Image (cartoon, grey):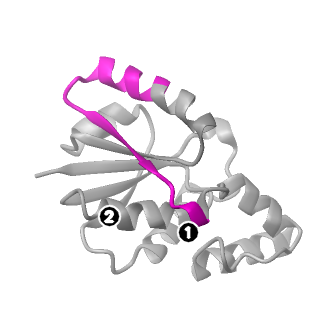
Amino acid sequence: MKNAIYPGTFDPITNGHVDIIRRAVKLFDNIIVAISAHHGKGPLFSIKEREAMAREALKGIKGVSVEPFDGLLIEFAKSRKCNFIIKGLRAVSDFESELQQALTNRELDKGIETVFMMTSQEHIFLSSSLIREIASYNGPLNKFVPKNVEKMLRERYRKS
């Protein structure tokens, strides 16, 4: 079986993320969307909120599950018997840091390969940080995130 992990903070999950996942299910038998606690980034949403948003946004996509994790990605991948890590690339600027991570992960476990997938052109400019900024100014979000995520962003920024 070809089992893959698609890791990220997903703060929040965007239509670009969903697009990568929809395309990746054609390549892999099972995909775990691995939501990183990543304490250093200071996320807008808790890990439980990010997990719930991702589950709802990905509902109905066969072969996809969502799990939180904390720690080294390669250890999480091994514990889930995943032999592939999926990484989305938006631009050349993403490649340098993603390549560094992929090479480090290969050193940690040569049996786990990183697969780079290019973001679809209509989502190439999207990032979770850009989405949070648009939401903070009550800008339009419907083209950028699933409906459930838009609702959560509106609620979060209404409270601030």
Looking at the picture, tell me which residue is in the foreground, 156 or 103. Answer: 103
Task: Choose top left, top right, bottom left or bottom right for residue 149.
Answer: bottom right
Residue 45: image tag: none
Residue 14 in picture, x, y percent from top left: 58, 65
Say whether residue 132 is magenta.
Answer: no
Q: What's drawn in magenta, residue-wise?
A: 100-122
Residue that label 2 marks: 65
Does residue 132 lie above or below 62 as drawn? above
Which residue is most to the front?
121
Circle 1 — which element?
helix
Marks 2 and 1, the one that precedes in the sequence: 1
Circle 2 — which element?
strand
Say whether residue 116 is magenta.
Answer: yes
Does residue 92 lie above or below 97 as drawn? below
Q: Residue at x 41, y 31 (%)?
A: 72
Q: Which quadrant, please, contains the C terminus? A: bottom right
Which residue is most to the left?
1
Residue 88 in picture, x, y percent from top left: 47, 48
Task: Tell me if 147 is positioned left or right of 80 in this view.
Answer: right
Residue type at mark 2: give it.
Answer: Ser
Residue that label 1 marks: 15
Q: Residue at x 60, y 82 (%)?
A: 147
Q: Residue at x 55, y 49 (%)?
A: 9
